Image: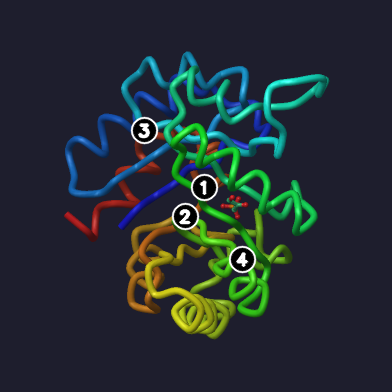
Amino acid sequence: MFVLVNLKAYPCDPIEVATAAADVSDDSDVRIAVAPQAAQIDAVADTGVETWAQHVSPNEHGSHTGSTLAEAVADAGAVGTLLNHSENRLKLADIDASLDAADRADLETIVCANNPNQIGAAAALGPDAVAVEPPELIGTGTPVSQADPDIVTGAVDAASRVDGDVDVLCGAGISSGEDLVSASDLGATGVLLASGVAKADDPRAALEDLVEPLN
Ligand SMILES: O=C(CO)COP(=O)(O)O
């Protein structure tokens, strides 16, 4: 299983989370990556944890003030990027161009989507993976695998009909090892999560709890 911890814009200590994630990943068989704010990618990557960007712009180098270039996040140490997160939705043409930008910079890609229909469309754009996250469950602590398991199995079906090489992750409300096992049972190869770790009093304990059933 792949666990991608999205720190969003939460006021957590990204280095504390990154260091814990690197250690817990090393001590388990679970691939764990952290997606911090763009300005913190460099420092987070220095901890040795697998580091992702939360977004990259569709632009190349040029007159694009405020852009987050794929080349820049890769230079800072990111190895992948989320795209089209529910809190940072993109137009279809921009998802496509951001995927091209990520390819140019050799970044792995996960395109997020709300539901199985959107997952099919996202998979058709050729990312490495897609992630289904029902927006109404994000940040609630109620896991998608429990509240709406059909969304996960529907996403797995939709992606495999379009392109069997595209991995499917799920996210929203995931915080425990039990949630991770349920996601895997439903056919997901990984999870996206945020508040369960970024808002935890003890992020290391939260990560250890998460991977415990897989060890
Ligand atoms: O949006 C998410 C991950 O990208 C999910 O957020 P929560 O884990 O806080 O529900």
* Distance between the alpha carbons at the discs numbered 1 and 3: 19 Å
- The mark that comes first in sequence, 3 or 4, is 3
Secondary structure under tag 3 reads strand
- The mark that comes first in sequence, 1 or 3, is 3
Q: Nearer the viewer, residue 65 or 61?
A: 61
Give the labeled residue for mark 1. 196
Disc 2 residue: CB within 8 Å of ligand 1: yes
Mark 1 touches mark 3? (CB < 8 Å): no
Give the labeled residue for mark 4. 122
Residue found 65% across the figure and 32% down from its top: 10
In the rendered image, the vertical position of residue 177 relative to residue 17, given as above or below:
below
- The mark that comes first in sequence, 1 or 2, is 2
In the rendered image, the vertical position of residue 140 relative to residue 144, given as above or below:
above
Residue found 55% across the figure and 68% down from its top: 123
Q: Quadrant of the N terminus?
A: bottom left
Q: Position of residue 117 (x, y in %)?
A: 66, 79
Give the labeled residue for mark 2. 175
Q: Position of residue 60 (x, y in %)?
A: 68, 29
Q: Quadrant of the C terminus?
A: bottom left
